[in-house]
Image: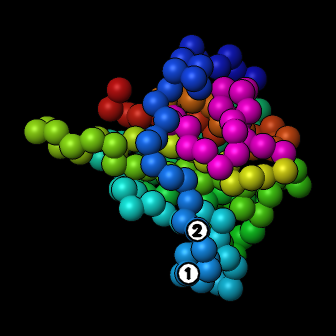
Amino acid sequence: MRAAPACPPFAERRLPPFPCRGAGKLAEASNTVNGVVLKSAEPSDAAKPTKHWRLYVFKGKEARGGEPCLRASYLLGRERRVVDLPLDHPSCSGQHAVLQFRLTAKSDTGKLVRPYLMDLGSTNGSFINGEKIEPEKYVELLPQDVLRFGYSSREYVIINADV
């Protein structure tokens, strides 16, 4: 297992000043895929990444892909009818977490889109660099953060090729 990169604790990371989820029956009815109600709704500031983010999957020391992140969000979990990135470990929930890219600022040089991770109230939690994150709250991801879900030994490393 690799040592986690030095990074600020969660208290020092930028937390988004926006609500995490839609609410009510209307949001629930409009957020259904293949007959399954999704636990997460894409926020109004969801945006496709403007930088070259990639997600690498590691099983032990072996890398299994370096998929480019081209969409605004990726649902992770065991429910293959609805998830974008399957988590096959039995300790992972059907809809475990969401990787969400959000527009956080606009400037003369363009848009600033940052990645966030939110645990969707899973039974066994989501971890960034070994630290369990609070459910249903977005936490900003930094380049080289190591993500883990439940008790799975697989690690997911987010890389920004522009850095």
Give the prevailing secondary structure in the magenta stretch. Answer: loop
Horizontal side, residue 18 vs residue 152: left or right:
left
Which residue corresponds to mark 1? 26
Disc 1 residue type (three-letter): Leu
Q: Quadrant of the N terminus?
A: top right
Disc 2 residue type (three-letter): Ala
- Residue located 81% across and 38% down the image: 153
How far is mark 1 from mark 2, CA to CA? 8 Å
The relative height of residue 135 versus residue 6 in the rendered view (above or below) is below
> Circle 2 sits in a helix, a strand or a loop, which is it?
loop
- Residue located 70% across and 45% down the image: 135
Taking the view exactly as shown, the residue that stands out farthest to the top is 6
On the question of residue 84 being in view, the answer is no
> Circle 1 sits in a helix, a strand or a loop, which is it?
helix
Q: Quadrant of the C terminus?
A: top left
On the question of residue 67 being in view, the answer is yes
Q: Mark 2 and mark 1 in contact (Cβ < 8 Å)?
A: no
Horizontal and vertical percent position of residue 2:
69, 20
